[in-house]
Amino acid sequence: MIASGFVANGAKVYITARTKEVVIETAQRLSKEFNGNCIGITSDISNLSGIKNLVEEIKSNINNNVLFPNGYYIEYGGQFESAQEASRTVAILSIFSIIAILVVLYMEFGNFRQAILVMVNLPLALIGGIVSIYFTDGIITIASLVGFITLFGIAVRNGILMVSHYNYLMEKEGKSLGDAIIQGSMERLNPVLMTALTTGLALLPLALAGEKPGSEIQSPMSIVILGGLLTATFLNLIVVPVLFAKWGRK
């Protein structure tokens, strides 16, 4: 990547990952910011999902090879700064979303034990999402974080389908715990699989369009949801019945 900054005479200064020294001979065009002078160096990149890695590489090279005089310092802004702020916002909203899900589940089932049992689907979905990122671009972006939040909602829904039906069979039809788990799992197998299948088919074209212009947001989000759906769906049908048999009874 090349970053270019303009000086007063129109000349450009180039910064690459291999640059060891940057010399600006004429710096007459200065901007005022925070009661100080500053020179802006801008860069255009084609892949916004890799902006964090790019800035980290530039930071590392500048810190290792450039010695600033006293009073001089460098700040990184623009899209990188916006992305950092957005990531913090999404992370905070994710925490509030998980808390809200737990509260709603408690209101639904009436006890925290079954609510937490349904929440087990979150790490099951997280496994697939992280693996899908690892085998694609390996970069966690804002779009990926949004995909995780969406994925958590789908995974929790599958858990609610299973646990609520177990409770119905035991409370309304008088089934034993074992019979309720077996019958409930079989009866909820088709709805869970159909949810995953329809969602997956809808997102597959978006996930495959990762290299096309305009897919910087849709593709990473779709990849995370698809990977998480795969693990959450199948592990949900195995892990939730086992945990419910041990800790699920009210």
Image (cartoon, rainbow, N blue to C red):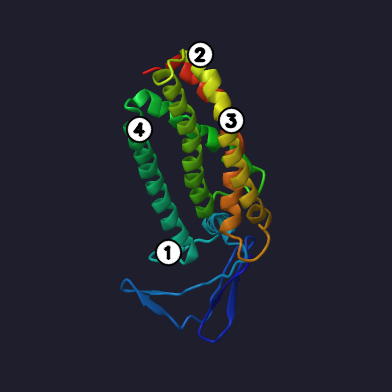
Left or right of 70 in this view: 236: right
User: Which label is found at residue 9?
Assistant: none
How many numbered discs, if any? 4
Question: Furthest residue to the bottom?
Answer: 9
Dot placed on the residue nearer the N-terminal end, 3 or 2: 2
Q: Residue at x 41, y 45 (%)?
A: 94
Q: Is residue 54 visible?
A: no
Give the Cα separation between the discs numbered 4 and 3: 21 Å
Q: Callout 3: few (<14), some (14-19), or many (20+) C-alpha neighbours within 10 Å? A: some
The residue type indicated by label 3 comes to Leu
User: What SS does tag 1 mark?
Assistant: loop
In front of the other: 51 or 185: 185
User: Which label is found at residue 178?
Assistant: 2
User: Which label is found at residue 189?
Assistant: 3
Quadrant holding the C terminus: top left
Give the Cα separation between the discs numbered 4 and 2: 22 Å
The residue type indicated by label 1 comes to Tyr
Dot placed on the residue nearer the N-terminal end, 4 or 2: 4
Residue position for label 4: 108
Residue position for label 1: 73
Q: Callout 2: few (<14), some (14-19), or many (20+) C-alpha neighbours within 10 Å? A: some
Left or right of 149 in this view: 195: right
Q: Marks 3 and 1: in contact by CB < 8 Å?
A: no
Q: Is residue 115 visible?
A: yes
